[in-house]
Amino acid sequence: MVIGITLILLSILAVPSLILSKKPDAKELLDKVAPYQGWIGLAFCVWGIIGIVSLLISGLSWMSHWPIYWITALAVNVMQAVLGFILGYNLIVKYVLSKNPEAAKKGEQLLAKLAPIQGKLGIAGIAVGIWCIIASFAFYGV
């Protein structure tokens, strides 16, 4: 359930224009969080990648026993990695990709593909986060 809530919060950071159109007084709060957006994005990107790798290495056995849980966990981790990459791109370039110009170029190309659909990805992240919370109550009694 906590993971679903954090994904929703990350998704809200990814779609500030949607939030501001519905609730204009949220601008103050978003302005307070903006300086930390890159670090938050970087942390979620790393967390999402670790989750994906973990699911693919040791979690494949879950698929036969708990397929809904596995698919939900994979969707959550993919959304965290993608939204984290978008939000933390500047820091990722500064600390990770700056040493490899070819990787930086590929990262820039990926960001160029993801940036136009950032709003849709944010909305999808909110939906996946809500599903994660619902699934935690419905299937696991958390």
Image: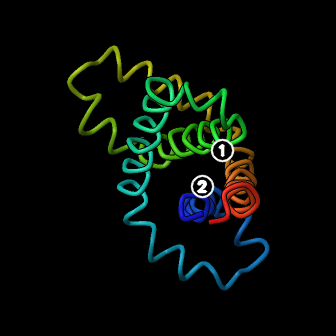
Task: Say if 46 sits above or below 25 in the image.
Answer: above
Q: Which residue is mark 2?
A: 14
**Which residue reaches farthest front?**
65
Against 103, is 15 above or below? below
On the image, numbered disc 1 is attached to which residue?
118
Residue found 70% across the figure and 72% down from its top: 20
Query: How is colour applied across the structure in the image?
Result: rainbow
- Residue at 43%, 60% in the rendered image: 37
Q: Looking at the figure, which quarter contains the N terminus? A: bottom right
User: What x and y, as percent, mark residue 132?
Assistant: 68, 55
The image quarter containing residue 94 is: top left
Where is the C terminus found, in terms of image quarters? bottom right
- In 3D space, how far apart are the residues under numbered discs 2 and 1 (Cα atoms)? 7 Å
Q: Residue at x 29, y 18 (%)?
A: 101
Judged from the image, the secondary structure of the residue bearing numbered disc 2 is helix
**Crowd tier of the residue under label 2, counting other residues whose Cα lies within 10 Å: few below 14, some 14–19, many 20 or above:** many
Q: Position of residue 12 (x, y in %)?
A: 63, 63
Between 73 and 6, the one lying in front of the other is: 73
